[in-house]
Image (tube, rainbow, N blue to C red):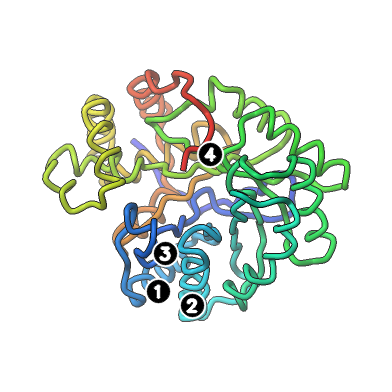
Amino acid sequence: MSDTAAVLKRRLGRTDIEITPIGLGTWQFAEGKGFDRFVYDGLESQVTNDIVKTAFDGGINWFDTAEAYGWGRSERCLAQALSAAGIDDDDVVVATKWMPAFRTAQSIGKTIVKRRMCLKPYSISLFQVHQPIAFSSVKAQMDAMADLVELGLIRSVGVSNFHQSWMRRAHAALAARGFPLASNQVKVSLMNRSIETNGVLDAARELGVTIIAWSPLEMGVLTGKFHKDPSLLDSRPLGRRMVMRMQIEKSRDLIGTLEEIAAANGVSAAVIALSWLVNYYGETVVAIPGATKVSQAEQNVMANSLKLSEREMEAIEQASCKFKTKLPFGLQG
């Protein structure tokens, strides 16, 4: 049987920034327009406000957004929700990302003003390169990021979806400027444990880099609700529906294990999946599940403090070990 404890914060990489094991991902705040409508429907502003307040009041102290999430819409909605909840800049950690597609490193310095305007009055604690697809070298991108740290426009630098060799390049380039690489945001979940076989986890531990797991619940598949009622898929945006159908059959045995442990702990399968993820790898992996409902934000809060027993952790490890297989690592979302 498991027990709960107060949420202990972790250092973000080798920076002085402290974050809870679970933060809140905010792609769903992009208002369901443009490309984003294929992934998330738009949320009412009051729902967004309630989700952010619930997460923060429950102890979650950091929120992850991106330029590409509605091209500023998610950033603005997050800032508005934080303000509506009366949260001070000093009490929250905000992470966002620069989209490098069809751009050079010069764009980092040119677009930071807009990122800060969208998030105003909140500062950028972590600024990440969203994908490894820029027209400039990793070194040029990291030099541009280091310039922003020196100017006091951001506090730390991260990358996203970088394989281990590119992560090492980013780390080396920043180290030459006297700064750590804080994080690498990649896809990690009980259904995608490829960081264990593609070198990313080993490199992160060696370099002191935090791994931020995006899509830790596989767009809801690991909650088990779609296994019980596949018709729920019909109401999901097309992009999500196509991926999730392929995942449901592969995960039936895993879901059975999660639900058994969840019942013993009086929580949901989602809480169990998240708790395992942010504890199995020590303090190296943190996660940013999203939330489109207040109840989902409440589950994220529960997972921050739930500690599973060694026997429960091992049962989940065994049920998910087939997902360690090395997968193609590149543009993953």
Q: Which amino acid does label 1 sit on?
A: Asn
Q: Which of marks 4 and 3 is in front?
A: 3
Q: Residues within 10 Å of mark 4 (few under 14, many from 20)?
A: many
Q: Position of residue 208 (x, y in %)?
A: 71, 37
The answer to whether 333 is drawn above or below residue 322 in the figure is below
> Front-most of 174 and 330?
330
- The part of the image, by quadrant, that contains residue 258 is top left
Q: Distance between the residues labelled 2 and 4?
A: 27 Å
- The part of the image, by quadrant, that contains residue 93 is bottom right
Q: How far apart are marks 2 and 1 (CA)?
A: 8 Å
Residue matched to label 2:
80
N-terminal-most mark, 3 or 2? 3
* Horizontal arrangement in the rendering, residue 220 relative to residue 49 (left or right): left
Q: Which amino acid does label 4 sit on?
A: Val
Q: How crowded is mark 2: few (under 14 residues within 10 Å), some or many (20 or more)?
A: many
Q: Which amino acid does label 2 sit on?
A: Gln
Label 4 sits on a secondary structure element that is strand
N-terminal-most mark, 3 or 1? 3
Residue drawn 39% across the image and 20% down it: 321
Residue contact between numbered discs 2 and 1, judged by CB atoms under 8 Å: yes
Q: How many numbered tags mark residues here?
A: 4
Label 3 sits on a secondary structure element that is loop
- The part of the image, by quadrant, that contains residue 224 is top left
Q: Which mark identifies residue 49?
A: 1
Q: What residue type is labelled 3?
A: Ala
N-terminal-most mark, 1 or 4? 1
The answer to whether 226 is drawn above or below residue 247 in the figure is below
